Image (tube, rainbow, N blue to C red):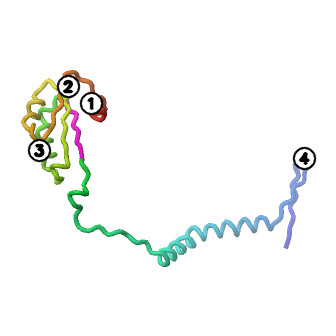
């Protein structure tokens, strides 16, 4: 069953056949069926044929596998919260020889430096006299 349609635009005649529309219809139907049904079935088949092997981790990570970590605290007039923050960081469940805590005091005018000095054996204090801002402190510590 072949029907030809003729459209006129000026002197040109364009013939479009029903077969083209049928091919487009069935092709788009096939694509929809494949996306929603065929692809999930194909992936399920491959997961059975080629199983994914996961590496199982044994219990805890050893002390030697943990990386060394540096924690930088840029502080400006933090006397109200700095002691609680330091105590919190010191109570972390991480090996003490693998962790370094650095407090960079950005021109603090309160008792921040004195509070941090109480923990001098566990924490390194880097006091700056001039206030330069958090970003500059982080960059300076990263580069040093």
Name the N-terminal-most of marks 1 and 3.
Answer: 3
Magenta span contains residue 120: no
Q: Residues within 10 Å of mark 3 (few under 14, many from 20)?
A: few
Residue on which the image places disc 1: 137
Name the N-terminal-most of marks 1 and 2.
Answer: 2
Q: Which SS class for mark 3?
A: helix
Name the N-terminal-most of marks 3 and 2.
Answer: 3
Residue on which the image places disc 3: 87
Measured in 3D between alpha carbons, the distance from the residue under mark 1 to the one under mark 4, in whole angstroms, is 74 Å
Q: Which mark is in front, 1 or 4?
A: 1
Measured in 3D between alpha carbons, the distance from the residue under mark 3 to the one under mark 2, in whole angstroms, is 23 Å
The magenta region covers: 69-75
Measured in 3D between alpha carbons, the distance from the residue under mark 4 to the one under mark 3, in whole angstroms, is 86 Å
Measured in 3D between alpha carbons, the distance from the residue under mark 2 to the one under mark 4, in whole angstroms, is 82 Å
Name the N-terminal-most of marks 2 and 4.
Answer: 4
Residue 82 image position (x, y, % from top left): 14, 37
């Amino acid at each position: 069953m072949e029907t030809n349609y003729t459209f006129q635009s000026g002197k040109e005649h364009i013939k479009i056949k029903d077969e083209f529309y049928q091919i487009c219809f069935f092709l788009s139907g096939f694509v929809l069926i494949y996306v929603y049904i065929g692809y999930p079935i194909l992936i399920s088949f491959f997961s059975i044929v080629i199983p994914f092997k996961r590496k199982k981790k044994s219990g805890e990570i050893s002390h030697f596998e943990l990386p060394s970590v540096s924690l930088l605290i840029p502080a400006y007039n933090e006397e109200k919260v700095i002691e609680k923050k330091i105590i919190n960081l010191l109570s972390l469940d991480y090996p003490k020889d693998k962790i370094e805590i650095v407090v960079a005091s950005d021109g603090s005018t309160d008792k921040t430096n004195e509070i941090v000095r109480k923990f001098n054996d566990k924490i390194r204090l880097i006091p700056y006299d001039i206030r330069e801002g958090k970003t500059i402190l982080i960059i300076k510590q990263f580069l040093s």
